[in-house]
Amino acid sequence: MGDAEIHGRVEELRGRVDEVDAALIRTLNERARIVQELVALKGEAGVALFDPRREEEILRRVVEQNDGPIYDSSMRDIFEMILHRIRDLEIQRSEPRQ
């Protein structure tokens, strides 16, 4: 493969990465909006907002569905961070504004 072909392929792959990044951003924000709706419903029903069993179920499913190349432990870490950051968002939303 010549330099021009390699450069073209690199640019193509970078474009695909950018598309995936944009899809991830949209998907994470959609997940956060769904969680916000769940929080509102749970609040109305007087149900505890955080369910550690549900979180563990999600993390177990993430590992089961992962077919690589990302290691299971790394994928679990990624999703733990997602879960915690969305929970942080909900905590911040519930705090009184100054």
Image: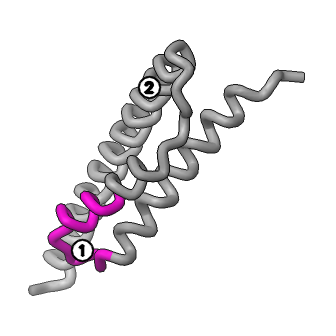
Check disc 2 and give the amino acid type: Leu
Query: Which residue matches tag 2?
Result: 38
Query: Which residue matches tag 1?
Result: 7
Which residue is more in the foreground, 41 or 29? 41
Q: Residue 56 at x, y = what percent? A: 39, 58
Q: Which residues are magenta?
A: 59-72
Residue 74 sits in which quadrant? bottom left
Q: Which mark is residue 97?
A: none
Quick one: which residue is furthest to the right in this view? Answer: 98
> What residue is rendered at 38% in x and 67% in y?
76
Q: Residue 50 at x, y = what percent? A: 54, 41
Dot 1 surroundings within 10 Å: few (below 14), some, or many (20 or more)? few
> What residue is rendered at 53% in x and 13% in y?
44
> What residue is rendered at 90% in x and 23% in y?
98
> What residue is rendered at 15% in x and 70% in y?
67
Quick one: which residue is furthest to the top in this view? Answer: 44
Q: Residue 82 at x, y = what percent? A: 48, 52
Which image quarter is the N terminus in? bottom left
Which residue is more in the foreground, 21 or 34? 34
Residue 6 sits in which quadrant? bottom left
In the rendered structure, which disc, 1 or 2, sits on the residue that comes first in sequence? 1
Residue 63 is a magenta residue: yes
